[in-house]
Image (cartoon, grey):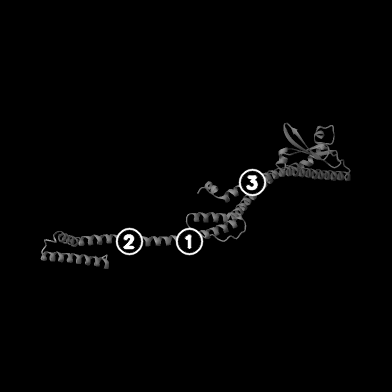
Amino acid sequence: MTLKEKIHTSFTWQLTLWVAGFVLVITGIVIFLLARFSQDAIHHESIDITQQALENTALRINNMLTQGEMTARLEHQSFRVNRGRIEQLVAENDYEKAIQQWLPNAEMFVSQRDSSQLSTYIAGDERGYRQMLYEGHEIYIFTQPIAERNFNLAVVCPAKDIYEYNPGVQWFLLLRGGIGVFFLLFIIFLVVARHLRPLHLLADAAQSIANGHLDTPIPEAQHKHEAGRLQNSLKKMQTSLATYMSEMQQKQDTLSRQNDELQAAYAEAKAYETLREKVLSNMTDRMAAPVEQLCQSTEAICRDYQTLSKEQMTAHQTDIMQATKTITELLDQLMENPTKS
C-alpha cells in the first residue's frame, strides 16, 4: 500500500495531517513574529553595545589624557590636547579594531565639537546615533563626547553591520522552532493514534465479521467516550448476531433432517408403489388363465346346458371348481403377503 492510499484509508493520518497543517501555519506565524522580534532585538542590542563600547573608549581616552596632563604638570612641561593626539591614542590602543569585532565595516573618527565643522554637523555633538543615506546606502553614525573636552568620538558603519550582528540568533530560533514543530507533530500523531486505536480495532473487527468470521473477538471497552460506546454496542450486536445465527443453524439442521426423512419416506412409498404395480401385474397375469377357463366353462353351460351330457356337465363343473380354487388361492396369497405374491 502506497503512502497516498494509506492516507486515503486512514482517519488517523488524515486527522494528523489536518492538525499538523494547522500547527504548521500557527508555528510559521509565531516563528515569523519571533524572527521580526529577534531582528529588532538584535538591532537594539547592537546599537546599545556600540554606544557602550564607544562610551568606554571615550572614558579610557579621557583618563589617558588626564594622566598625561598631570604628568606634564608635574614635570613642568606643556601638554596639548588636540585631534591628532586623540587619533594617535585610538591607533595605538586598537580601539577601532575592537569595534570591528562586531561591526566589521565600522570606521572610527575623531571630530571637534564645533558646529562650524561638517563632521560635527553630521554626527552631532551629543551622545547618540543617527541614521542617514550616504551615496544611496543606509549608514549609522554613533557619537560620544570625550568627557568635557571639545572632541567627540564617532563610529560610522553600514546598516547591514547593525542588522547582521549575531546572525546565528535567527538561525538558532529557526532551528529551535523546527525541532519544536517536529516533536509537536510527533506528539500529535501519538495522541491521535492512541485515541483512534479503538476505531481501527473496530473497523478491522467489523470487516472480519462482514467476511463471515462471526467469532472475531471484540474486547471490552476501557473508555466511556464515543469510541468506547461504539465498541460496546458492536460487541452486543456481535453477541446477538451469533445467537441469531446459532438459532438459524439449529432450524436449518432440523429442516434438513425432516427433509431427509421425507425423502426417505417418499422413496419408500415410490418403491412400494412400484412393487404393488408389479405384484398386481403378476397377479393379473396368473389369474388370467383361471378366469378365462371359468368364463369358458360358464358360457358353455349357459349356452348348451340342454344338450350337454352328464359327463360333460361334470367336466365343466370340475373346471369351474378348479378355476375358482386357483383364483381364491391367488387372492388369499395376495392378502397374506402382497409384496411377495
Q: Earlier in the sequence, mark 1 or mark 2?
A: 1
Q: Is residue 36 visible?
A: yes
Image position, residue 191 (x, y; %): 61, 54
Residues under labels 1 and 2: Cα distance?
A: 33 Å
> Vertical placement of 4 versus 198: above or below?
above
Q: Foreground residue, 63 or 159?
A: 159
Vertical relation: 48 (above or below) 254: above
| Crowd tier of the residue under label 1, counting other residues whose Cα lies within 10 Å: few below 14, some 14–19, many 20 or above | few
Left or right position of 295 against 178: left
Give me the disc on residue 22.
3
Q: CA distance from mark 3 to mark 1?
A: 53 Å
- Residue 94 visible (yes or no): no
- Rendered location of residue 32, percent (x, y): 68, 43
Instruction: Inspect the image, locate mark 2, and give the three-letter code of the amino acid beneath it.
Output: Ala
Please state the horizontal and vertical placement of residue 196, each as a whole percent of the image: 59, 54
Q: From the image, tell me which residue sits under label 1.
A: 247
Determine whether the residue tagged by mark 3 lies in a helix, strand or loop. helix
**Disc nearer the start of the sequence (3/2):** 3
Q: Which residue is mark 2?
A: 269
* Cβ atoms under marks 1 and 2 closer than 8 Å: no
Q: Identify which residue is drawn at 21% across, 62% down.
A: 287
Q: Earlier in the sequence, mark 3 or mark 1?
A: 3
- Frontmost of labels 1 and 2 is 2
Q: Residue type at mark 1? A: Glu
Residue at image coords 30%, 62%: 272
Q: Amino acid at mark 3?
A: Phe
